[in-house]
Image (cartoon, helix red, strand yellow):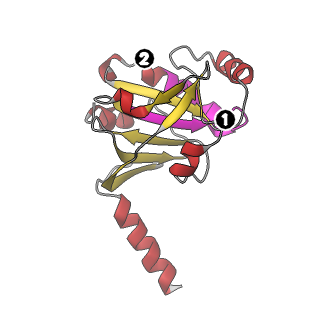
Amino acid sequence: MRFLIIFTFLLTNSFANENTDIKNLIIHKNLKKYDGLTFLDGKNAELNLDEHGGKLILLNFWATWCAPCKEEMPSLDLLQSNEDLDNLKIFPINVGKDSVEKSLKFYKELKIENLELYFDPPITLAKKFGLRGIPTTILFNKDGFEFARIVGSINFQDEKFIKWLSDYN
């Protein structure tokens, strides 16, 4: 039991370096750089995250069968259209092995207008990031370093979150 308490304390302190009360947000103390982050767009063309340097990047991992994903997707769509975050690029990446058609139907049902479709068909990114569930959102600064994660769903239109995110924009 003592080991578990110490491990939990160390794990919590290794991630948090900033005090926020934003639900499910984990801010990393030590930034992490990844190489070779690729995924597919809706036309099956490969994209490399390195090609989007200089932007604040948000990778959101989701699936059509995921109820919390469905709940947060409309607010994520609105976040992409926020004019105060013009240097933000959102990549919603489907890891549910859903077809393009099923994913487009999901977008249409939720009235998603500002986000494109992306896929991680062999689930290589999900493995590389060690995802334990979805939705999970990973945030990269302008230099391409992961600086935070959101584990679980949030309201991307929450004023506290937008204010916090705008500090990185």
In the rendered image, residue 37, in percent from the top left (x then y), is placed at 46, 39
Tell me if I can see residue 158 in this picture.
Answer: no
Magenta-drawn stretch contains 85: no
Number of numbered discs on residues: 2
Q: Amino acid at mark 2?
A: Ser
Q: Quick one: quadrant of the N terminus?
A: bottom right
Task: Kindly indicate the quadrant of the structure image that contains residue 62.
Answer: top right
Magenta segment range?
Answer: 57-77
In the rendered image, residue 111, in percent from the top left (x then y), is placed at 62, 15
Of residues 128 and 104, the one drawn nearer to the viewer in this rendering: 128
Tell me if I can see residue 86 in this picture.
Answer: yes
Question: For mark 2, does the 10 Å Cα neighbourhood hold few (<14), some (14 to 19), or many (20 or more) residues?
Answer: some
What residue is rendered at 36% in x and 27% in y?
A: 52
Farthest-out residue, bottom: 2
Question: For mark 1, does the 10 Å Cα neighbourhood hold few (<14), some (14 to 19), or many (20 or more) residues?
Answer: many
Q: Quick one: quadrant of the C terminus?
A: top left
Q: Is 12 above or below relative to 25?
A: below
Distance between the alpha carbons at the discs numbered 2 and 1 = 22 Å
Q: Which mark is residue 167?
A: none
Please give the residue where the numbered disc 2 appears in the rendered image.
Answer: 81
Q: Is 34 above or below relative to 162?
A: below
User: Which element type, helix, strand or loop, lies under badge 2?
Assistant: loop
Query: Closer to the N terminus: mark 2 or mark 1?
Result: 1
Please say if the residues under marks 2 and 1 sit with CB atoms less than 8 Å apart. Answer: no
In the rendered image, residue 94, in percent from the top left (x then y), is placed at 62, 33
Of residues 44 and 115, the one drawn nearer to the viewer in this rendering: 44
Magenta-drawn stretch contains 72: yes
What residue is rendered at 50% in x and 35% in y?
A: 38
Of residues 20 and 81, the one drawn nearer to the viewer in this rendering: 81
Please give the residue where the numbered disc 1 appears in the rendered image.
Answer: 63
